[in-house]
Image (cartoon, helix red, strand yellow):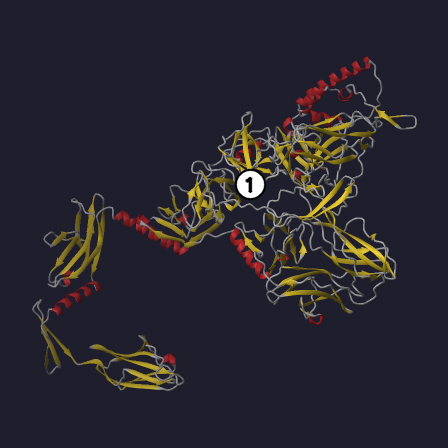
Amino acid sequence: MLQFLHHCSIRAATYTALDEGGLSPLPKRAKPTYLAMDKENQIIGYVVPIFRGSHEFESGLSDTEEARAKESAGYLARRDLFARGMESERVEHKSRRTVVRESAERISLKLYLTQYHKRLNEDSLMHTPEFVIKPRSHTVWEKQCVRLHCTISGWPEPRVVWYKNNVSIDPMAKPGKYKVESSYSVHALEINKCDFDDTAQYRVSAMNSKGETSAFASVVVKRFKGEVDESLPSPRLPPCLEYGVKFETHIVEKFGVSFGLEGETLSFGCSVIIYPSLQRFQPEIEWYRDDKLLVPSKWVQMHWSGDRATLTLSHLNKEDEGLYTLRVITKSGFETHSAYVFVRDGDAEVAGAPGAPLDVHSLDANKDYVIISWKQPAVDGGSPILGYFVDRCEVGMTHWAQCNDTPVKFARFPVTGLVEGRSYVFRVRAVNKAGMSHPSRVSEPVDAMDPADRTRKGTSAPWTGQIIVTEEEPVEGVVPGRPCDLSVIEATKNYVVLSWKPPGDKGHEGVMYYVEKCVSGTDSWQRVNTEIPVKSPRFALFDLAEGKSYRFRVRCCNSAGVGEPSEPTEATTVGDKLDIPSAPGRVVPTRNTDTSVVVSWEASRDVKELVGYYIESSIAGSNTWEPCNNKPVKGGGILHGVYGITVLECVRDAMVLAWKQPTFIGGADITGYFVDYREVIGGVPGKWHEANIKSVSERAYRVSELKENMLYQFQVRAANMAGVGIPSLPSETFKCEEWTIAVPGPPHDLQVQEVRKDSLVLLWKPPVYQGRDAVNGYYIDIKEADADFEMWRGVNEKATDKTFKKIKDLKEGESYVFRVRAQNKAGVGKASDPTEPVEAVTKPGTAEIVVNVDDDGVISLNFECSNLTADSKFVWSKNYMEMTEPERMTLETKGNKSKAIFKTPSEEDLGIYSCFVTHTDGASASYTLSEETLKELLKISHDHKFPIIPLKTELAVELLEKGRVRFWLQAEKISANGKVEYVFNDNVVHQGEKYKMNFDKNTGTIEMFMESLGKEDEGTFTFQLQDGKATNQSSLVLIGDVFKQLQKESEFQKKEWIRKQGPHFVEYLGYEVTPECCVRLKCKVANMKKDSVALWYKDGREIKVNEKLDFSEGVLTLEIAQISKKDAGIYEVVLKDDRGKDTSTLNLTDQGFKDLMNQVFSVIANSSTPLKIQSTEEGIRLYTFVMYWKCLIVMFFTDRARVAGGLPDVVTIQEGKSLNLTCNIWGDPVPEVTWLKNEREMVSNDHYILKFESGKFASFTITSVSTSDSGKYSILVKNKYGTESGDFTVSVFIPDEEPGRVRTWC
């Protein structure tokens, strides 16, 4: 048979408090004793005192009257008035007459107090509850007790309620778990024997007629992680003495290992002796199965007779198999007893049929499906199990319906076709070729409803006693964001289960979800739940085609609409993958008793979702195997021995040893090590002795009480939950003599992490022996694993003061070994033992630490491991020192991903961060957070915390028709949730008569309109944008001249609009000269009616009708034939009707008349005959005849100004030379000469010398030509007869330039 050994360590703490209170001081009395003593002062019993209305005699009021008095303000007044005046008095027996007299005096006093109360202002005494002392948060070990207490003031006396995670605590619901105490203003909540479920936020609420207030405190329950020897008694706190009694508990007639058959009834128990035996105080009896507290049910009944505790299992099933523990708890502590119960399979109805499945439970439940899971039986009946059938039954019914037509091979099955809101129970049957097994034990009832509805159904809001009605502005609906972390958590041929996280931006009303799928390789998405969205972030999909690959995504929705889809999942192939675990190895039985053994084994490797192990036994030679356990057990494997035992330090009577971890740890964590030693005399080893009774967790230990100058050998054994492993081989023989060398001893515990194809990180611990001086550095040596000893070479030329080193420039595929030497002022010490060979290779699936900044600006380091095992843990370190409870970071692990989140990143966080995953093949990585990287991350974090909405245009202003003012800007992109505030001079303005707003979210255009601008509108206009977390703003300052100009333009535009409402001028009055040499005054008008009038005026006098007046096609004209000087004047046209009038004026006087005549003369000149020339005594006579006015034009010309010659077209000259040009000028009178460079007039100076001599010669000189002198030059000559110019270009070249490359500017 097989017996499982179970060890547990429990910490218990019990708190007691005697409440003393009273509003008024009471007479001091001798402290009563409630213990019955004999003559020798030995406790013989307990005395129960009888109280006969003592409280009524003390207060003068009955309980009902006093309760009523406490609800009035007068109660406080009476306490304050008489509390100081009461004196202590003796307790004496009073006659009936005395009692009556005192009663009459009290009635008189009560009457006086009633009148006194009426004169008090009750409102001045009443006030809302206040916390004088708030409850304090606690962190406690598991199994300890914790007490939350607070002091509350307030009148009327507040009603105090305690809550756990916003659910009120009822001490009667869990007797012994919670204790609530209230002593006037002091209130306390005591939680007994804390477990992990007690980790929560606790709230205490105080309420009276004046209001309510609350305070919060957190309780964190931690598992004890200290070094505990499982073989030693459980640690206990000092016993708690209640009323001076210390209880002693003894468990006798203990139950032993029990065996039962399925369907039978099994009872077992223990007798309990408690001394002293007090009838009033009964112990608390608890039963556990596999460390889980049992509660009474139809399968389990518990009985306590006063001296015997009994547990009855009414209908044995394999689920009842396990380690049962009885715990007897008193005020002074507790005692326990444990034994194992085995349950065998009942006889099958059909010979060869398998055993019944066990542990049937709901893995996932929704409104239209339930996923059922179970464990396979240990007995298959001699032939493999072909599959399982699942049955269901509605709660309250007796009819069972089979859910699947064909057996399922997986121990998991989705049951569909359920009615929403109803409850079901399930059972499973196994089948092989011989037949069907008995059905399993039925599951617990499962509700077919949405998990979100189930959560709300099970949680009720605490009643506060107040109904508060508030009026709020209706909240604008917000379309929810994208779901995140969508993943496929389970996939079989029958169904796929999706899980995701809700979006960060959910709006005010919560969200529901639509699930979509598409076949891999396509982009055709189909909605799965087309009718009703789901409420919980989990969903199972059915009816998928086996063998096909699918991708999935999720959308959120609410009343505002449907949000954007999440990122799709990776392709998931529908089908069953039977990951059958590999066989365990190295089964080692160890005798325990005459009839039992302890079995250890090597755990199966690379097992996914391991349920447990079945152990089978066989009589030697029979080859018939029988199951030892019918319920899977989680076991630990055997341990190989440690190796590499070395000495780190030696003194006269002690030696410090170090060793290396076993190559195989048995599938469970090592809990400690045991060291043995023996003397070696004359080369003959002696007997082994234990160096430590309690295991040590470090791989180094100081062995004390040795003999000086003696020779010793050592061996080390590792231990885990399965037991103590095989001892190591004996070490070398070491002599116990004090080291006196000056240099330090060897470093130890060398470890290798972050192995890549060209680098790795080497870690070590400082030497135990420091030498004469402290260690100030380390040297690292390296060599190829197969190289000779002489091939050791140094990695670092300068000693490092760190206990880690990243070694680079390794050859891929080469194996290396490393060692470390410590140094102090005296020199370099002995080298450490070399590491095991390490191959420089990057293993498949190796990941690096990724830094991430989320949408909230939170900076985190993320590491993912693809080859996790069930026992793997992520270990984060800073500068390769493990961070167990970091103050500046938060560590989170979910599945195969872990992250280290910075709380407030600063320069204190600079360093190397690494993550190592235990129980893997060395999965690890690191990330160096430098100052530059931190600055960049902080910038990104700031951008994410305070994102900016990008703008296409800044805030601008423009004028519209009627003089309206438009302020506008355009954002590059803004969602439907975008909002904008319009601010003027730091005050928010809203839609109204003065301001009109428009926000087009499709184009991102934001507008604000004003009908006009007044003096009060001078200032700064700002548009403030918000889109989720993103914000931005743009401002426009309109003050001073800018505002006045805009205001003036606005007023002008408004007037123009008003003007154009009646007859008005489109083109104002002007003139033109016709080819017939007539002057025509004209203007263009619009919006004319039949009764519209157009009046012409000259110099204020209306032009008579006999003048030629015309109006056709919106143009008014007035023709003047053969214009003369008498026609000069100011002309005006007036348009008017009942809608208004408009005026246009034309000034034809002075310069205006001259300009008009020039045009007339131009027309006349164009009508002239060809020019003729005639020489006369007066000069050269030019004459012609013109068509109009029949006149002869004669002009006499002498010498017009002109450039006679001498200037080249282009001048090319070398830099540094001087340029001189001269040209001839002709003209009478003598012309004026002007020189130009690039169309700009030049002035003579030292560089440019300009001369005009004798009225005929113009010279141009440039002294010391430079490249800046290149350009276009002109000479302009002018006299009263005309003007003429001459142009030339100067190009300057540099001698060093290639021929033909002339720098030219023109």
- Seen in the picture, residue 503 relative to 822 is either above or below; the reply is above
Farthest-out residue, right? 40
Nearer the observer, 286 or 1190? 286
Q: Residues within 10 Å of mark 1 (few under 14, many from 20)?
A: some
Q: Is residue 755 visible?
A: yes
The quarter holding residue 1280 reads: bottom left
Q: Position of residue 140 (x, y in %)?
A: 71, 41
Q: Quadrant of residue 1205?
A: bottom left
Q: Quadrant of the N terminus?
A: top right
Q: Which residue is mark 1?
A: 410
Q: In front here: 791 or 562? A: 791
Q: Residue 444's spot in the image, x, y percent? A: 59, 31
Q: Position of residue 39 (x, y in %)?
A: 92, 26
Left or right position of 1258 against 568: left
The C terminus: image quadrant: bottom left
> What residue is rendered at 59% in x and 29% in y?
463
Q: Amino acid at mark 1?
A: Phe
192 in relation to 1214, above or below: above
Examine the rendering and report whether any part of residue 1262 can be seen: no
400, above or below 952, in the image: above
Element under disc 1: loop
Q: Residue extending furthest front? A: 621
Numbered label tally: 1
Horizontal placement of 453 versus 1306: left or right?
right
Frontmost residue, 111 versus 749: 749
Q: Residue furthest left?
A: 1190
- In the displayed structure, 552 sits above or below 660; it is above
- Left or right: 636 as drawn, with respect to 704: left
Percent across and percent down for residue 64 are 70, 20
